[in-house]
Amino acid sequence: MSDEKKLRLGILGSGKGTNMVAIAEAITAGSVPAEVAIVLSDVADAPILTRAQERGLPARFIAPGKFRTKLDEEAEAAYIAALKDAGVELVVLAGFMRILKGEFLRAFPQRVINIHPSLLPAFTGLEAWKQALDYGVKFTGCTVHFVDQGVDTGPIIAQQTVPVLSRDDADTLHGRIQFAERQLYPMAISALARGLVRVEGRKTVTGAETKS
């Protein structure tokens, strides 16, 4: 792995940073040919920033601006500049509670990914594990996908199933989905870093290494 080119990641998060930690640990273990170039948060005291700093990773808060669910124009420009200045090649959303559209996605075309706590296209939006539990499905899971102009509608990269148990409540089901996320996200990033995933129309194709 030491001879492989390392994909430079920019990780955006608003909360605890458990997926960021899982990715960083997988990189340290040598299973993901990537490096975390920068960690950014829209929450000044978010634990993800502390966890990044504990691992010696560049991390900073950038104010999100005046809107509640998205970045305003000035904030969006600041995030794009910080990521580009860090040489980021892939933007990884790890619990980032802002919708990214427009100029941001144009700055990183097919280079922004997210992990969602359901088997998309089922149960988009917030608290997907509660939606699954209320609907009565027997299986749910998590999905790594490219981010597009919709909400949880981008091409799917990888999925992992999680059974819904008869004794589950929202917290226990969410906990098992989060455990699956920490396994799936590093694996998906590894496949992207190795050039094993490409987008064809609305779908992704996984296979032998692709040449750019």
Image: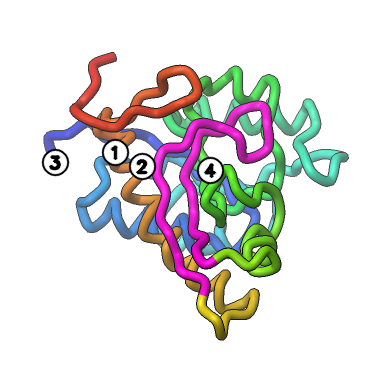
- Which residue is drawn at the image coordinates 29% and 51% (left, top)? 27
Circle 3 sits on which residue? Answer: 2
Tell how many labels: 4
C-alpha separation, residue under disc 4 versus residue under disc 3: 27 Å
C-alpha separation, residue under disc 2 versus residue under disc 4: 11 Å
How crowded pointer 1 is (Cα within 10 Å; few <14, some 14-19, many 20+) is rated as some
- Amino acid at dot 3: Ser
Nearer the observer, disc 1 or disc 3?
1
Give the image location of residue 55, x and y in percent.
40, 60
Q: Quadrant of the N terminus?
A: top left
Nearer the observer, disc 2 or disc 3?
2
Would you say residue 108 is visible in this rendering?
yes
Q: Residue furthest top?
A: 212
Give the image location of residue 141, x and y in percent.
49, 59
- Amino acid at dot 1: Ala
How crowded pointer 4 is (Cα within 10 Å; few <14, some 14-19, many 20+) is rated as many
Q: Which residues are magenta?
A: 138-164
Q: Quadrant of residue 29?
A: bottom left
Circle 2 sits on which residue? Answer: 189
Q: Are marks 2 and 3 in contact (CB under 8 Å)?
A: no
Q: Nearer the viewer, residue 134 or 198?
A: 134
Circle 1 sits on which residue? Answer: 191
Would you say residue 91 is visible in this rendering?
no
- Amino acid at dot 2: Ile
Whichever of labels 2 and 3 marks the residue nearer the N terminus, that label is 3
Q: Are marks 1 and 3 in contact (CB under 8 Å)?
A: no
Whichever of labels 2 and 4 marks the residue nearer the N terminus, that label is 4
C-alpha separation, residue under disc 1 versus residue under disc 3: 16 Å
- Which residue is drawn at the image coordinates 38% and 54% (left, top)? 184
Give the image location of residue 146, x and y in percent.
51, 33
Q: Is residue 89 left or right of residue 123?
A: left
